[in-house]
Image (cartoon, rainbow, N blue to C red):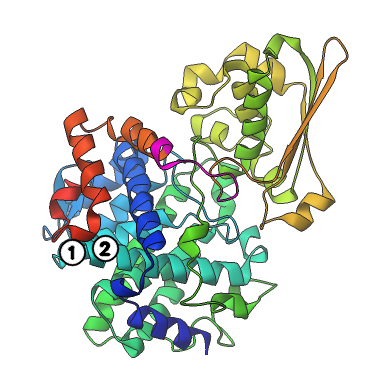
Amino acid sequence: MITKTLSAYIAGLHYIHLPPSVVDMTKVTIMDWLGSVLAGSRQKPAQIVADMVKKEGGNPQATLIGFNEKTSVSQAALVNGVSSHILEMDDLHKGSILHPAAPIIPAAAAMVEHESASGKDFITAVVAGYETAIRIAEAITPSHYYYWHTTGTCGTFGAAAAAAKVLSLNEEETRHALGSAGTQAAGLWEFLQDGAMSKHLHPGKAAMNGILSVLLVREGFTGAQKILEGKKGFFRATASEIDENKAIQGLGEMYKILGNSYKIYPSCRHTHGIVDLGIEIVKEGIKAEDIAGIKVKTYSIARDIVGNPDPRTPFEAKFSLPYCLARALVDGELVLESFDPAVIKDPKVWELISICSVDDDSQMNNLYPARWPSCLEITLKNGQVLRKETSYPKGDPENPVSKDELELKFKRLASMTKDETRVEGIINDLDDLENVKNINNLLI
């Protein structure tokens, strides 16, 4: 049974089992997540959810990161999960098409704080969550992704796994927790049609529902025993193509967190390969005013999700490949300020968008999601044609971003809410996380 096998793995995983490379990668991943949470806490969707939670009230069990307040463990996971995903700077695992940090680490952090657990417990819980969510997502990718936002759906399983690990649930208890998580797993792509805030709600609810599932188990609540592979279980209900073996293949031998990708641009990951190529063009001395035509080829899911040629809001611009590319060609970079409402109206950018076409390519479709390929062809006004291709955006394991670069990214995001001394202190604490006895002070 797939569910039973995963549950046994989660219950049996301990810090001592983790290779040093996995520990180091997990600490970097937690740092990368925390930067997104701290900066995201200042954004409107996070403020709305936090205000709602404050009005409802809750026992002060876990920290609302960036708000310097505490609430119940499940509500803290909700708010912190929402904050994680707003700026589009959180991590991604390309093979599963999943943003794992946003739903998993808020659940792990809230539960570790609630239980006064250690840094080693935190690391182990995050690894358990990543292994669970990524593997489940890989089993149903890419067909699941057509309707379902994997971060909300599979992220719920990961959040439950992380929380279960903190509470040291046994195999049977963990199976019940996954059963309750699976029946709550949700997240639909319809928000793209109107730029709704639902995307940010998905990881928050996934984190919250994962914790709810685990807390209910502790009180004796039961869940479906074959929630993944059952006849009316998660796999069959949400995917037309399933490879169940991917959920358990190499379990305990291959660690999925080592295949994680990190974002250096604050936009949908489907735009990043093309932005890389656009910045390369600029570095070669090409200016926006030199360009007569732009052709983009990519895989069909990227075209469908980020092909929007008429973005009018910051959210829409983050999901517009033509805008992100044009902005990069004008500025030679793509940063948070690239999505300010006034900046979006830049006529130089709109001139480039008007001459940009985005098409899918059958060969690229066959490579996705193991690779996220893109091809950029630019025709200059002098008739010269420039062509560049990539299969791995910057931040993929095959095209890695360094720890120093990720620390710089963290400093930029964390400095929106913390002073320089505190930011440096957080980096030092995370670098020594396995020796931290209690993570409470880390999250304030």
Pick the quarter of the image with the C terminus. Answer: top left
Give the residue type that dot 1 points to.
Ser
In this orientation, does residue 83 appear? no
In magenta, the rendered stretch is 397-405
Foreground residue among 226 and 387: 387
Foreground residue among 352 and 117: 117
Q: Quadrant of residue 51?
A: top left
Residue shown at 58% from the left, 38% from the top = 319
* Coordinates of residue 294 in the picture (x, y in percent): 78, 25
Residue shown at 70% from the left, 55% from the top = 368
* Coordinates of residue 46 in the picture (x, y in percent): 32, 43
Q: Secondary structure at mark 1?
A: loop
Dots 1, 2 in contact, CB < 8 A:
yes
Give the residue type that dot 2 points to.
Phe
Left or right side of 193 for 406: left
In this orientation, does residue 88 appear? yes
Q: Reply yes or no: does residue 403 show up in magenta.
A: yes
* Coordinates of residue 226 in the picture (x, y in percent): 49, 87
Q: Which mark is residue 122?
A: 2
Characterize the local packing of mark 1: few (<14), some (14-19) or many (20 or more) Cα atoms within 10 angstroms. Answer: many
Q: Residue furthest left?
A: 60
Q: Secondary structure at mark 2?
A: helix
